[in-house]
Structure formats: structure tokens, C-alpha cells
Amino acid sequence: MASKFINITLKIWRQKNSKAKGALETYTLNDVSTDSSFLEMLDQLNEQLINEKQSPIAFDHDCREGICGMCSLYINGRAHGPDSGITTCQLHMRMFKDGDTIYVEPWRSRAFPIIKDLMVDRSAFDRIQQAGGFVSVNTSGRTMDANAIPIPKADADKAFEAAACIGCGACVASCKNGSAMLFVGAKVSQYALLPQGKVEATDRVLNMVRQMDEEGFGNCTNTGACEIECPKGISIENIARMNREFLKGALTKS
Amino acid sequence: MSKLNSRIPEGPIAEKWTNHKNHMKLVAPNNRPKIDVIVVGTGLAGASAAASLGEMGYNVKAFCFQDSPRRAHSIAAQGGINAAKNYQNDGDSVYRLFYDTIKGGDYRAREANVHRLAEVSGNIIDQCVAQGVPFAREYGGLLDNRSFGGTQVQRTFYAAGQTGQQLLLGAYSALSRQIGLGRVKMYHRHEMMDLVKIDGKARGIIARNLVTGELERHSAHAVVIASGGYGNVYFLSTNAMGSNVSAAWKVHKRGALFANPCYVQIHPTCVPVHGTNQSKLTLMSESLRNSGRIWVPKKKEDAEAIRAGKLKPTQIAEEDRDYYLERRYPAFGNLVPRDVASRAAKERCDEGHGIEANDTNEGVYLDFASEIKSKGKQAAYALGDHNPTEERMIELGKKWIEEKYGNLFQMYQKITDENPYETPMKIYPAVHYTMGGVWVDYNLQSTIEGCFVTGEANFSDHGANRLGASALMQGLADGYFVLPYTISDYLANEIRTGKIATDSPEFEAAENEVKESIDRFLNNNGSKSVDHFHKRLGLIMWNKVGMARNEQGLKQAIEEIGLLREEFYKDVFVPGSADEMNPELEKVMRVADLIELGQLMAVDALHREESCGGHFREEHQDSEGETLRDDEKFKYVGAWEYNGSDSKQSTLHKEDLNYEFIKIAARNYK
């Protein structure tokens, strides 16, 4: 890896808390290694701010390998920045040029209120999960053997692809309607495709959609931005499957 | 020594757990709602415990510092989970998993605990499938398996390279169900700041709401610590940025002994270090060693030419490559345990065969070329093409690799900007897991009554080296199938206690201590950031308490960390205030604990004058560079008692390890 160093200008959203008014602030940062990840670049900026006794920028992050779903950020107008199939923590500075100006904003959605600077509150996703995103089995020392029900490989693979969702919220942030249907569709699909999930499929989809609506997420109008920006490549096929399940549930549930 | 009663049940090893379960006390269903339990941490161990206890009817409060319980770092586990199902008919059994784990841990784990782990392992897979966890399957619809290090059977269940994610989301869904039903109250973005003890028993915690900064008092009849490991003491590790030792350390400071802190797992296959602003290291799953072959150039001049960019690995002829694991360990080959593979990589790089052009030239190749061809050939045959061209084999082989390891290959490509389908991966060992942790007895209870510790946060099951795919197994075993029984045995004596008030002097004092320590940091007016100190601590730890340790280095580390601690308290600068979201304040509190822990790790490593598993003392190796244990003197768990922030003052207690059912021997993977 031939590392290079670049100088950049950053326009970053600063907001003290959920009630305060926010604004874009300008920062310059020099000697950024192109091998650094985007978040390591923000670490470098924060170190500089701390050394100048200024307040560092608050942003969510944890695993820094693209799986925990904690990092977010709207970078130059795109969720998780200018690369595809990745989260912000996997975005590297080699995607930028010397002298670039980079805009960094939080997820923007009514259902994701800002906590501070670039951090948002995504607990609405947890509440949707709590409404029905599970199979109702208790912990049991007497569950049937794992191989008792064979599952066609194609179904298991599809369920896995849906279950790969990391709950980051990029789909909501990218959607002009602020819809969470890719997130909910993925969870509904995972269970709908597996025999273990079929038992409660109707209640699950009705309950999760109800909670989704209560949280203030919008509806899907098939724009497809969510699928393009999803770091895990979750397909909007899952939204279609959820709609099918929902319709079936709504018509059959007395 | 009276402090350490391991409470191992009597009887033959295969009957201990069953007999113990049959004689433990129970809490009747109508009494459970009167009992409060706190669970700190929502990874596999915490989420499974909180969900199971909620299902039973206890009043559970669960805490995590992340924005959602689903973010806990178990999510990042890649390769798989072991279980003695013997679905592959290749000779596996409960005994074999038990034996492999004890041997893999270099005979420094407690027999009874490990056997119980192996016994319940199969049930974990049943439970997860029932929850809708989408494990990988074969075309016949049954579950697929792969191999991991230190074993000669295929017992690892997986979901691509995202097994931890799928298992954690399974536990999270069970937890979510209980939250929805009101049986578990979830406190996300909350950090445990201290344990509250009343009359010697754990009775609650002080937590900080990370959004508002408010300190909160939470009482309970028992407290479960499931807060993970302490690899972040090295600054650079495969742990998440937020992973920390603080919950475990607070319990230690309140009287729980901390066992085997020097047992650290350095994972052989991680993306090598690239620069000084690097914040963390990324694991490339051990499962890749099923398919990849590890090598370095035989000739030093080839290694030099590669580092200088004059030669590509694909240009090195087969006979000029040293597949050093296959050479040294023919019986296990590339699938030797992690500590063995890591030391072998270090040995080659120390000898000048490293291939990475970084400061230390540390890196070796993990090469998939021959697997791509052989799996491509199989795939072609399956399609009826019995005479495939080389191109066809490579094309189909890449597809096979993508299905098995796609996400790992993509991660690698994004970090390094190199395509591992075309050129071998560059890898090097990095800190990954900590076998040491809070000392617990057979019931997973620490030396503080009512304080239970599960998962990576305890010390109990992996000895001096953990085998791959066993962390997920332990986390879920503890939370689903062990703790619910053992904690009930304890709680049976609590049914008459009633609600525990939070306005007692003990809660008051604990909250004031937390407040004081926050105020001290915020008013410190120092000149250097928290990260500045954390990075310095990490360097001392990596260089002197890392993959190879010696007396002189450890003595230096103990002194240097002591001085660093003094400087840290004098000169650390924390911006912002206590009553707001303040990530720097969170960090400073965690690093303060990591410094004390780091020093204790060096103290423990210095006292243990033998090599075992991940603890390699250069003075104690055989003529071929393998670990040399001293069973006469060190066949015990070293558990330390806290005596103040200078860890040199800690007192050692010993739990002797008795091997009644396994014949103790030198580990041999040759």
C-alpha cells in the first residue's frame, strides 16, 4: 500500500443537543493518510480540536469493521459516503483527493432525532423489533434437534441475505419518504422464509408494520434509493415480500 | 486461600452438571416477579441471560453503552460456533470437544466447567435454529459444518463469515420479545459506573445515562456482569472501539478476584498495521484457514524484493515458498490453535521473511489459489463438466469462495485496496480475545455474593488459549443454559428480601464516588487527550506484554505503566461537561481502568514463570520454540485481589487445577 497524504476541508454539522439549532461548521485538516478510514480521519480532526481546547465532534461508531451498524453519516449527500456496499467505517480516504471539500451530516429523518452533532437516536428500530421481530420460543433444554426440519438451501440462503441487515438506518436516511420498509421487510422476510418463523408470520407483519407507522416512518413508493445505499445490499424484493405478507395478513386476520 | 471455593460438584465428570441441576434450589414462578436482576452488557452472554431470565418471570433490567443492544461486539464474530453434534460422522463427541478444549487451553482450564460447556453445546444449536437463526445449509437441507483450529473434526456451525451477527441477532430477538412483553427493561446508551454492595452482597449499580449525563441508582437482588473482554488495553485490537474492562474492573475493585489477566489471545490472521493514525485492527476469520494456506518466501532476498515492491507473491515459484505451518505441524497443518499459529508467524518475520512493507516488516501470506482451483474443479464436476479448463475452474472456484467468505474478502479489499481473489491476503497476528477475567466458581458467581460474571468477562472455560468458534459457544451456554439455573439457586434465598431501596448510605456513597471521579477528570486542566495516553499504554503492552514476554521487559512494563498512570492523572485533558453526551468523558473513565488492568497483566505475566497457551515466556520454551509449562509450580488459576490503583500491591490467591479425567500432557500438534 503506497500511502499518500492529502489536505482537506470539512463542512460538518454541529448541534449541541436535540433542542438546539444546528449549523455547518468549516474545518481544515492536513496530512490525512489515504490509508486512513473516514472515521480515523474524524479521530484525527478530534485530536486536533482537543489539542486546541475545542469541543470534539460527536459521532456514533463501534466495531469499525462494517458489522455493528452503529456508524452512520451522510457524506457528500450519500449515506455512508461515495462508495458502495460499505458502511462509513469501511470508507477509506483514498476515495478523496487532495484539496477536496467534504460535507458531513447526520442521518436526516423525523423518526431519528438528533442527539448531538452527527449522532441520532435510532431506538425506533428497536421498538419495531420488539413489536414482532422474533420467533416466540422460550429458552428450552428440550428444543427439537436442529436437523429435524430440513430447510431448502435456497430458502436458507435467502433468509440469511435478509438477516444480514445491520440496522444502521441508511435506508431511512436515503429515502425521500423517510421509509423504514427495507429494514422491516428484511426482518419479516427472514422469518417468513423459514419454517420456524411461519407459525407467527401473520401477527408478526401486522404488528411490525403498525409499530413502524406509529414511529412516524413514511411509506415506500418504489424509488429504490434504499437498496442502492444499503451497505449490505439488501434487496427491495424484501419489501415486496413484506407487502405480500401484510396483505395476506390483513385479509385473513379476523 | 479460603477465598477460593470453586464449588465443583462431586461425582463422575459426565454426571456433575446433571446431578447439580437436580439438587439446586428453585424459585417458584409466582415468586419470580418479586425479584430484580440486573444484567450489564447485551452481547451473546448478556442478551441470552436477560432474555432467559425474563422468560422465567424475573424482573430484569439490562444495560448497554451502545445505542442498541444489537450492537454489542459479539456481532463481529465471524467464523462459527462449535457444538458436539457429530452431524458429519467424523468421530466427534461431547468428550472429544471437552478434550480438545482442555488441550487447546494448554491444561489451564477447569475440567468441570469445560465438560459442562461441551454437554450443552448441542442444545445451543437447537435453540438458535428454533429462533430462526439462518445457519449455512447443504443442498439436502441439513446444517453444514466447517473445521476450526486445534481440532480434527468438523463441528463448527456457521452463517457465511457473519456467524456472530446471526447468533447475536437471534439473542437480540429473544431479548426484544421480553422487552416488548415488559419483562425486561432495557437501558441503552447507559454505562455501569460502579457496583453497589450492601452487607457484602451485590445489590445494585450506579449507571450513567450517556445522553443526559445523569447518574442513576438501580437496585437488584443479583447483578450479572456480561461486559466482554479487555483486549482494548492494547489500544490496537480487533475489539470494538467501545469495548472496555470497566464493568468487570469495578466489580474487581469492590472485592471480586480477577483471574489469569495475562492470558491474552493474539489471533494469527488479521490485516497488518498500516499507519500511526490507525484506530483498530480487523480480523480475517480463522475459518479462512480451512481454505487458505499460510506461507512466506523461503529466501530472505525474495521477501526483501516483495517489501520493496519489486516482486509480486504470485511470481514466487512453488518450491520457493515456505508453508511453515504445514512444515512444522503436519498433523494439523494450517489449522493449529491460534497461539501456535501466531508465534510461528512472528518467528518467520523475526527471521527476516516478513512480507509487509510497514515499520516492522510484519506480515505473512494467506493464499487461496490452490483452494480456488480444487473447489472449482469439484463445482465443474457437479455441473457435469468432467474436463474443465483452468479458466473455468478458477471462475467456479471464485464463486465458491465468495459464497463461503464473501463478506470477509470484501472487508479485506476495502481496507487494503487489494483483491484477495487475485493475490494472497497479507495477514499478521493481532490482539483478539482475553481468556482471563473475573474469577467465578462453578455457578459463575464471583467472590462477591450475588455478583455473577458470564461470557468473555469471566475466566473460566478457555484456560490459557481459546479454540476458535468457542467464544460464541461459551457466551450462549452461560446465558441460556447455565446461569438461569445457578442464579435461581442463589435467588431462592432472596424471596423474602423485598424491594431493595436505593436511598441507603451505600448507594449514596457509591454515587458520590462516581461523581467525584468525573469532576476530577473534568477539572483536571491537563494538556493531552485521552487517546494520547491510551496509545502509549497500548505500545507498552504490545511490546512487553504481547506475543512474547520476558522477565526484564515485564519488570520495565510494570514501572512504565506506573509512571504513565501518574502522568495520566496529572495531565489528561477532558473537554465538555458532565451533564451532556460526552464521548471523551466516557473514554477517560475507561482508560483509567485499563491502565490499572494493564499493570496487573504485567504483574501476573511476571509471576507466571512458565509458558502456556497465549502466555509465552521466552525463558520457557523447548528446543523447537514450543511452550514449556511447569505443572509442578503453576498448575493453578492465579486470582488477584485489588489493593489500590497500584497493581503491584495486588494479592495473589491460587485455585489448584485438578485433572481427574484427562491425562495432562505436553500439547502436541505435530
Image (spheres, coloured by chain):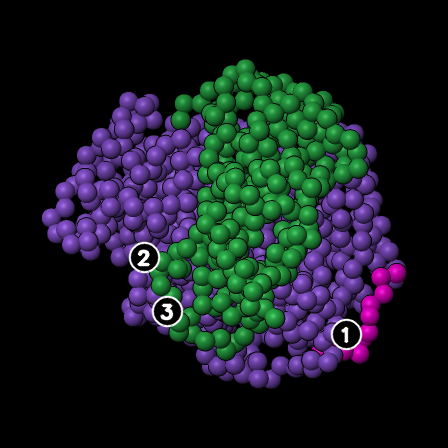
Chain colours: A green, B purple
Asked if residue A58 lies in the magenta stretch, the reply is no
Residue A41 coordinates in the image, percent (x, y):
57, 28
What is the number of the mark on residue B484? none
Residue B559, above or below B258:
above
Magenta run includes residue B499: yes
Residue A169 visible in the snapshot: no
Residue A210 visible, this angle:
yes
* Magenta span: chief secondary structure: loop
User: What residue does disc 2 label?
Assistant: B669
Query: For the residue labelled by badge 1, is the local secondary structure a helix, a strand or a loop?
Result: helix
Q: Nearer the viewer, mark 3 or mark 1?
A: 3
Question: Residue B177 sits in which quadrant?
Answer: bottom right
* C-alpha span from label 2 to label 1: 53 Å
Picture disc at residue B34: 1
What's the amino acid at mark 2? Tyr
In the image: residue B343, left or right of residue B261? left
Query: Which amino acid type is marked by label 3?
Result: Pro
Say which residue appears at 81% left-offset and 41% top-offset: B579
User: Residue flagged by tag 1: what amino acid is it?
Assistant: Lys
What residue span does the magenta drawing correspond to? B492-503
Identify the residue at the far left of this view: B387
The crowd level at tag 1 (other Cα within 10 Å; few <14, some 14-19, many 20+) is some
Callout 3 crowding tier (Cα within 10 Å): few <14, some 14–19, many ≥20: some
Q: Which mark is residue A150?
A: 3
Query: Do the dots labelled 3 and 1 sit on one chain?
Result: no
The percent coordinates of residue B127 (x first, y second) are 50, 69
| Element on which disc 3 rests | loop
Query: Which residue is nearer to you in this view: B341 or B636?
Result: B341
Categorize mark 2 by other alpha carbons within 10 Å: few (<14), some (14-19), many (20+). Answer: some
For discs 2 and 1, the disc positioned in front in the rendered view? 1
